[in-house]
Image (tube, coloured by chain):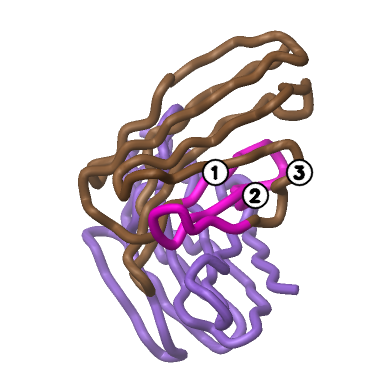
Chain colours: A brown, B purple
Amino acid sequence: DAGITQSPRHKVTETGTPVTLRCHQTENHRYMYWYRQDPGHGLRLIHYSYGVKDTDKGEVSDGYSVSRSKTEDFLLTLESATSSQTSVYFCAISESSSPLHFGNGTRLTVT
Amino acid sequence: EDQVTQSPEALRLQEGESSSLNCSYTVSGLRGLFWYRQDPGKGPEFLFTLYSAGEEKEKERLKATLTKKESFLHITAPKPEDSATYLCAVRASGGYQKVTFGIGTKLQVIP
């Protein structure tokens, strides 16, 4: 798993509640990413980070925010969860032009 | 806009029956084409990177090839343990974060 831990692995929450997903890496890679995976859509980039406190939006960033205060940790926050955010969320890491390596995901259900 | 199309969506093979998966792509300046394997409940696992037309990579029963418009993942004499979803992705010029994924091909190998 390239030293990537995602927590929690599963979460059920109610519409309107805040949710934070955590990604921790032990590889000291510069780039970290959050993707969501939904049937019929494949993996879509939510946000990414290119260094501590350096983040930017991906293609499906609405309703999500991120923070990276340490090289090893990248947090994804849903400020007010909606049913459309029910998905499987994957964290990935890379070094510059190297391939992305993924964690095992967090399955989030918003009821 | 970068696009990745994989075919077929699903493939069922008898053990030992060789076949190929296709990945067609359009990208603004290819900076790498990646193949991943994804098992249920797990994150994508990196298999290969291809950078230029004519390049080939092999790993056990898998061989990936690349042309200017598509890539093939050839599976020779597959075994049931090769059953998984295979994802193709391309990285475009303009930033290491610009990685676009296909929806994948779900492969089932029957004993």
* Disc nearer the start of the sequence (1/2): 2
Q: Is residue B43 visible?
A: yes
Q: Are marks 1 and 2 in contact (CB under 8 Å)?
A: yes
Residue drawn at x 42%, y 77% as measured from the top left: B65
Residue B106 is tagged as 1
Measuring 24% from the left and 47% from the top, which residue is drawn there?
A2
Q: Main secondary structure of the magenta part?
A: strand
Q: Nearer the viewer, residue A22 or B19?
A: A22
Q: Quadrant of residue B50?
A: bottom left
The disc numbered 2 marks a residue on which chain? B
Give the CA separation, mark 3 to mark 2. 29 Å
Query: Residue A60 at x, y = what percent?
Result: 72, 49
- Residue A49 in the magenta stretch? The answer is yes
For this rendering, which residue is in front, A43 or B60? Answer: A43
Marks 1 and 3 share the same chain: no
Q: Nearer the viewer, mark 1 or mark 3?
A: 3
- Dot 1 alpha-carbon crowd within 10 angstroms: few under 14, some 14 to 19, many 20 or more: many
Question: Could you give the CA–CA distance between mark 1 and mark 2, rounded to whole angstroms?
Answer: 6 Å
Residue of label 3: A62
Q: Are marks 3 and 2 on the same chain?
A: no
